[in-house]
């Protein structure tokens, strides 16, 4: 198997689109060479724990309402082209994602990462839920088949906060400045929400290489 580390943030729309494109390639090929691990990156590491009003955040980040509308107009089109339903109007707040990343980290132990990541994207982008809310995260864990009580106990403390921040810092040290970033085989990076065709090509090349070994 080839290790595929996906550096991502569950509030990043390009990460949602990139995952969808990758999933389509994996489904198209049926057999694939990847052992996938989701890695943390906070787009807003200085975000207050309670998050902030999303409209205010976007306007500050993109230079006012017109800039935000232009950027998210392109994102909305890209999401539609990927066949994704996104309800931007339902998203009232931009959350701090440290706890969502902790949940993703814990889900790896139980081989539930893909389900948890799917849930986080779905709840944020399609339902407008606050994925920093511990009640939401507990329900994500329950839906994914994780132990809700254990998750609640871990979320109530600071378990793995420093580990998540250290992984985020390591990604930045490696040169990651935006997400998604896919590290293939621990050796080369594929940046951005690549089209499905790019992933099918990569998968085919890896499978062909494996067959000749």
Image (spheres, rainbow, N blue to C red):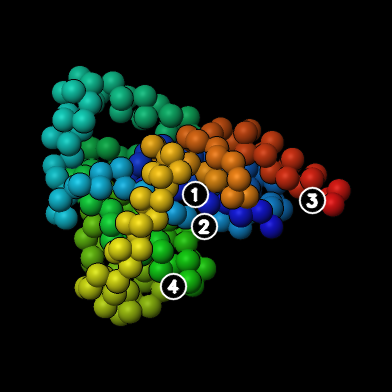
**Circle 4 residue:** 145
Disc 4 is placed on an element classified as: loop
Residue 121 percent coordinates (x, y): 38, 50
Give residue 210's mark: 3
Is residue 148 something that shows in the picture? yes
How far is mark 2 from mark 3, CA to CA?
20 Å
The mark lying in front, picked from 1 and 4, is 1
Nearest the eye: 142 or 34: 34
**Circle 2 residue:** 37
**Local crowd at mark 4 within 10 Å, few (<14), some, or many (≥20)?**
some
Q: Quadrant of the N terminus?
A: bottom right
**Circle 1 residue:** 6
Nearest the eye: 5 or 51: 5
The mark lying in front, picked from 2 and 4, is 2
Residue 55 percent coordinates (x, y): 16, 35
Mark earlier in primary sequence (2, 4): 2
Task: For the residues labelled 2 and 3, say whether their Cβ atoms are less than 8 Å apart.
Answer: no
Give residue 151's mark: none
Nearest the eye: 94 or 79: 94
**Local crowd at mark 1 within 10 Å, few (<14), some, or many (≥20)?**
many
Q: Is residue 165 above or below residue 191?
A: below
**Local crowd at mark 3 within 10 Å, few (<14), some, or many (≥20)?**
few
Disc 1 is placed on an element classified as: strand
Task: For the residues labelled 2 and 1, say whether their Cβ atoms are less than 8 Å apart.
Answer: yes
Mark earlier in primary sequence (1, 4): 1
Mark earlier in primary sequence (3, 4): 4
Residue 181 percent coordinates (x, y): 48, 41
């Amino acid at each position: 198997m080839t290790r595929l580390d996906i550096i991502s943030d569950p509030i990043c729309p390009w990460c949602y689109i990139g995952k969808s494109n990758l999933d389509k390639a994996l489904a198209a090929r049926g057999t694939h060479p990847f052992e996938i691990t989701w890695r943390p990156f906070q787009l807003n590491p200085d975000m207050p724990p309670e998050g902030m009003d999303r409209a205010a955040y976007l306007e500050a980040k993109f230079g006012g309402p017109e800039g935000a509308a232009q950027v998210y107009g392109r994102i909305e089109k890209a999401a539609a082209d990927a066949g994704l339903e996104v309800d931007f109007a339902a998203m009232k707040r931009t959350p701090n994602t440290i706890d969502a990343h902790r949940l993703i980290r814990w889900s790896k132990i139980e081989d539930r990462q893909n389900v948890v990541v799917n849930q986080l994207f779905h709840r944020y982008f399609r339902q407008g839920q606050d994925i920093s809310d511990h009640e939401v995260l507990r329900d994500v864990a329950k839906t994914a088949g994780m132990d809700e009580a254990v998750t609640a106990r871990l979320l109530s403390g600071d378990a793995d906060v420093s580990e998540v921040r250290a992984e985020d810092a390591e990604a930045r040290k490696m040169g990651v400045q935006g997400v998604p970033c896919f590290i293939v085989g621990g050796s080369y990076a594929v940046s951005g929400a690549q089209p499905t065709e790019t992933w099918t090509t990569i998968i085919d090349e890896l499978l062909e290489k494996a067959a000749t070994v």
